[in-house]
Amino acid sequence: MNKRLQSLRYMLFDILGSATAWTLFNIYRKQIIESRLFGIDLRFEPDTKFVLGLIFFTAFWVAMFGLVGLYHDPFRKSRLRELGTSITITTFGTIILFFVLLIDDYIVSYKNYYEALGVMFLLVFILTYIPRLILTTNTIGKIHNRKIGFPTLIIGSGNKAVNTYNEIKAEKISQGFNVVGFIDLPNGIRADSKLILGEINDIPEVIRKHEIEEVILALDDESPQTITKVINQLAPINVNVKAVPGMNDILLGKVKLNRIIGTALEDVSFDLMPAWQANIKELLDYSLAIIGIVISSPIALVLAAIIKLTSKGPIIYKQKRIGQFGKPFMIYKFRSMYVNAEENGPALSSQTDTRITAIGKFMRKTRLDEIPNFFNVLKGEMSIVGPRPERQYYIDQIVKVAPQYLLLQKVKPGITSWGQVKYGYAENIEQMVERLKYDLIYLENMSLYIDFKIMIYTILTIFKGKGV
């Protein structure tokens, strides 16, 4: 079950479909609209203009379909939802192309504009959606017949968990859940001990070891503390989470039906942004990182020379940090401290820290030491805006006081953040916990609009020299 290959299949169908749509549309323009206008039969003959248009037209539609997430998670698609998304994005894209490609066309009357819009919409929609529908239907059929399954972990070991497991095993039409085991909870009743894979604290390791893709919360009358602990363990992990609804949820109307077959489950979403905003954010990250590297290169060269001439050691300082989904990576920064500054162990810096070099103090006040972070963004390890990444040493201490810190690992760490703007650098664990609330507020309100505001405030901080 190769997700990347399946996504490429969808993309290939869209490339072929949109290329065919462009070809047929140009035949229509030449042999119907222009022939009617000039009163003679005109033949369609491909030329350089047509080829350039073909490349642009195809790339445009693939980008539009990717923007709304049609290539994301290719094995978990809803045909009805995909139909609605396809109609919406094809309508929107057709209107854009009308003003880009068709507004200056030769026409007999304005009715030709409406005809052209309608023909383009139908060609693109039919030639891209129908192949996509066939591929999706084929995939869903394989899931229903258990030819495709997703490794699934059930959180819980009581009556609800056991009943859910039995229902899934008895399904005539599979939903794709391939249950590998349970996580034991302190609720008194136990599932088959052979299927118990661990306890709450083992959740991340169990998910990694068994390559879990689906998690089902089947909690009996667990305490709020237990539920919170489970959620904190799951939130930073890249898995799909579903829950078995309780009777109170059903009576209060909180359960939203999203499938009509199989075990009744409700989606537990940790998605912080709509798919299209998340895709634009990622595109902006790469674009702004390239622009940032180009614009800052003269300053970076000067800083590199000063660092090299004023203190011994490398120009670029590399340090292991924890990124999205708890994955470690090496962060790049201009060195702002003397060599061996942490020979006695990890230590946070302060305004009076004697380990910081003279140029280091300036760089930290203006945030210029973080210019190399742009390369982390290009590597896909960081974002322009997001919670600042920390070392595992400090994360272990923070989690003891504020376990909700793990929620920050749901997103890529950033060069700048709301916590950094509002609070600045932290000098101890207490201040790191205090800064955490601003980053949690950011997660709750995450949007492109908020990102732009944070970027603006960061630029002001740089010019005011208030980084520390």
Image (cartoon, rainbow, N blue to C red):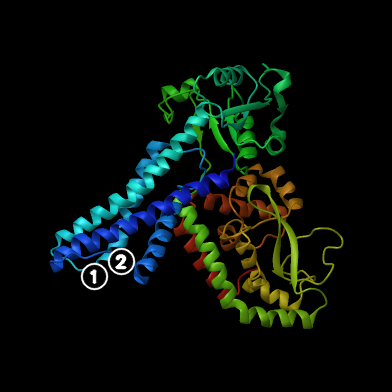
Which residue occupies 61% across, 25% down? Answer: 222
Residue 93 at least partly seen:
no
Q: What residue type is labelled 2?
A: Glu
For the residue labelled by badge 1, is the local secondary structure a helix, a strand or a loop?
loop
The amino acid marked with disc number 1 is Asp
Say which quarter of the image contains residue 135.
top left
**In percent of the image, x 38 and y 63: which residue is there?**
54
**Label 2 Cα crowd, 10 Å radius (few <14 / some 14-19 / many 20+):** few
Q: Where is residue 262 in the image (x, y as percent from the top left)?
A: 48, 23
Screen quadrant of the N terminus: top right
* Location of mark 1 (residue): 104
- Is residue 57 left or right of 295 when viewed as pictured? left
Image spot of residue 71 (x, y percent): 48, 48
Left or right: 332, with 75 as reference point: right
Looking at this view, is 466 or 102 the one in front?
Answer: 102
- Point out the image quarter for the C terminus: bottom right
Q: Nearer the viewer, mark 2 or mark 1?
A: 2
- Quarter-of-image position of residue 318: bottom right
> Disc number at residue 136?
none
Nearest the viewer among 37 and 279 is 37
Q: Give the CA distance from mark 2 to mark 1.
A: 20 Å
- Residue toward you, 424 or 5: 5
**Quick one: SS at disc 2?**
loop
Judge the density around disc 1: few (<14), some (14-19), many (≥20) Cα neighbours within 10 Å: few
Residue identifier under label 2: 45
- Does residue 179 appear in the picture of this structure? yes
157, above or below 107, in the image: above
Left-right relation of 460 to 47: right
Residue at 77% x, 69% y is 353
Q: In this view, does 292 lie above or below 272?
A: below
